Amino acid sequence: MISSLARLTVRAWAATLLAACALLPLVESTIWILQAALLLGVQAGVGAAARRVPLARPLTVAAQVVVTLVLLTLMFAREYAVAGLIPGPDALRFFGQLLEQGGQDVNRYAIPAPLSDGIRLMLVGGMLVIGLLVDMLAVTFRSAAPAGLPLLALYSVAAGLTDNGIEWLWFLLAAAGYLMLLLAEGRDRLSQWGRVFAGPPRGRSRETPGAPAPARFGHRIGVVALGIALVAPLALPAMDGGLLDPNGRGMGAGVGGGGTISAVNPLVSLRDSLNNDDDRAVFSVRTEMENTSDLYLRIVSLDDFDGTTWKPSKRAITQVPEGFPAPPGLGPDVEFTEVGTSVSVAKWYGQTWLPMPYPPSRVSVGGDWRYEPVGMTLVGDHGQNTRGLTYEVRSLDVRPTAEQLAKAPEPPADVLREYTELPDSLPSLVHETARDVTDGAKSDYDRAVMLQDWFTLSGDFQYDTQVDVGSGSQAIARFLKDKRGFCVHYSFAMASMARSLGIPARIAVGFAPGTPQADGTISVAMRDAHAWPELYFEGVGWTRFEPTPTRGSTPDYTVPDVEDNGPADPARPSQAAPADPSAQPSRSTDCRADGSDPGSCESESPQAALPAGGDGPKWHVVLLWALAGLLVPALPLSPLLWRTRMRAVRLGGHGRAEEDIAPHVLAAWEELTDTAWDHGIVPDESLTPRGAADRIVRTGGLDGDAAASVRRLAGAVEQVLYAPRPRPAVGLADDVRRAAAALRDSASRRARLRALLAPRSAGRVVWTVSDRWATLRDRLVALRPDRHLPTRQRG
């Protein structure tokens, strides 16, 4: 039969392997996990052999470390090793080079990355390190609970880098492996202790063959715990951050800069969180650009639309190049100049993405940043953000003409395929409206201008931050009917309509032009947070349009009768006001256009592109978070709290009648035996009270008053068990406290700490719940109607 130690070793190997499954989506090939499983098995086998000798615990771990290095050398650096086996200086130097190459590959490739040698070393080596820690903690040092920390680290790294919708499966596998490890250790300890709980026989639970009741009940607890862990996140409120969130929680890259960009949901929730009147300055900008009304600070583009969410596509991010390549689609015939822009960020604004004019050609910025080449954006790595930064951006001021846009050839097939994709769930009203609005257009440029003019001039739309147009796939259709919304609604509606007409489109998120200052700088405030559509024209590239009335600036190349690309007409957006104004004051008034004080008008919050909440948290959300906050510290302290409560009940007040003597004496005795158990003196049901008392005194090293207290309590128990009329006993609670204090004084600091925080006697809870469940089950079975039917006789 397999020994309990060998069984625990196998469980530790399996737990590590299950947790490592979360890494599978990171690379294209899965062969590495088979190699790692084989090496991990050899590592575990060496540990099992060393423990069987037995070697000292440090020597066992040292033997596993040596074997692990030899295994990695055989797999990755055999030609650099001494005798092809021993890792010498050359092999260690090669390992360093391979790890450096793996780090570069992580930065270079998007998920799933190809399985290069460097990435394979990181995966296999990391798995062996985690496996060594788990085996050392759970098997060598016989403490399975802390082994969950390296398993959690392994799972967390993988979960933080992937976003494939089945993270729950990896969690379930990792949690099942950890639970399997805990149950194996618990069963091993129970088999060593035997049935150590005092009390009467437990009926059916004692007679059931197979696993002991605690093991069976432990499996039930494990299944319930996993179920709660999977379901609880659905019930608890989510803590979402916005893309323009000052804390930078909205989006970001994975560890090492090689991850993917997390999804955001800026449109379909349509929650009214845009009425924050915080008008603090976010940036102070100084630019060489002549027409500062075109100075949009772009953060990121959203190009993946599934009907309910616009988000960035998964892109590879790389090292920031010295000079950026030419923007996609820009031809030699379009006029442009390179201009410089200096941006100083407020110390309180920590954004993960770097706001820049588009398209950038060179960036000079301090810190740890990575470059996403498709969107031409910079994203912070290893927690890097914009807080307090000052940086320089060189960008292209592209000035296409209306004629160039109108004569643009058809975009490449891959651009059309990727940027005109729309989900089947999008309402047909979107395409029908786009077709009606652009009826008679001769080119995609004409269609784009007609859509922009419909939103800003002829469509009777109103800018309103108080709208509630619903959510889901019908949100855009509702907005097109109600004709009220803010920049998110306008930009997303125009991009969707453009795609329905076959025009490649995406959404840019960032900040609209700020307010010029007397010193020549431009102040960009929170109210300038904005979203706008970008449409692709071959020969020009991604081109900004402005469909939001009274916000931003209308591009010169979309204004009729403007041939010289002069400054945009600032009065043009105000033409969107209806011919017959309402008697009610309009919320769509542009404070800058009418000359009013900017601080007195409503403004868009930094969540302008990412509505994240309503009018503050609801009472039930606050209550749920408060309960969750209380539950987190209560779980590890629950054994301590239970023992404190039981001690108070057993030693508390009691009746003075004759029938109250026995319960009080037995409760005091049970508290004494549990206290001794907490300090390592396991109860023995085969002993008489006097024998048990002698064992506690002898094993605990008690003498004097403490020993007399224990024996006095044992005498009271014998009176209750055997005397016809037991004598009243006084001072039993003091006797128990005196004996408990002596047991604590004679124990080591580690034993005292364990008795306080993880008392062994807390295992009584498992037995109590198991017995009550068995009793309830028996009662339910007894109530079944078929048990009362007469038995059919043969004859």
Image (spheres, grey):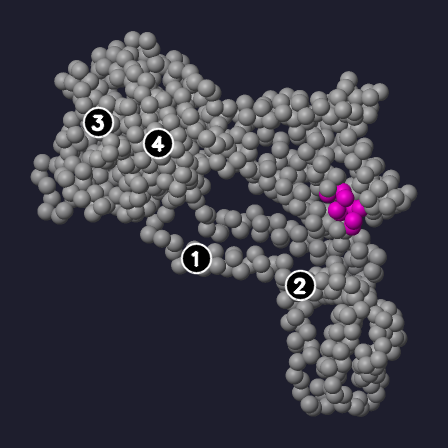
Name the residue tied to disc 2.
639
Disc 1 and disc 2 in contact, CB within 8 angstroms: no
In the rendered image, residue 123 lying in the magenta stretch gets the answer: no
Q: Magenta residues, as a range?
A: 134-142
In terms of sequence position, does the residue under pointer 2 or pointer 3 come before the other? 3
Name the residue tied to disc 4.
343
Q: Quadrant of the N terminus?
A: top right
Q: Residues within 10 Å of mark 3 (few under 14, many from 20)?
A: many
Name the residue tied to disc 3.
554
Cα distance between the residues tagged 1 and 2: 27 Å
In terms of sequence position, does the residue under pointer 3 or pointer 4 come before the other? 4
In front here: 469 or 162?
Answer: 162
Q: Amino acid at mark 1?
A: Val
Q: Residues within 10 Å of mark 2 (few under 14, many from 20)?
A: many
Q: Residues within 10 Å of mark 4 (few under 14, many from 20)?
A: many
Q: Amino acid at mark 3?
A: Thr
Question: Could you tell me if residue 729 is visible in this image?
Answer: yes
Residue at 37% over, 31% down: 355
Name the residue tied to disc 1.
622
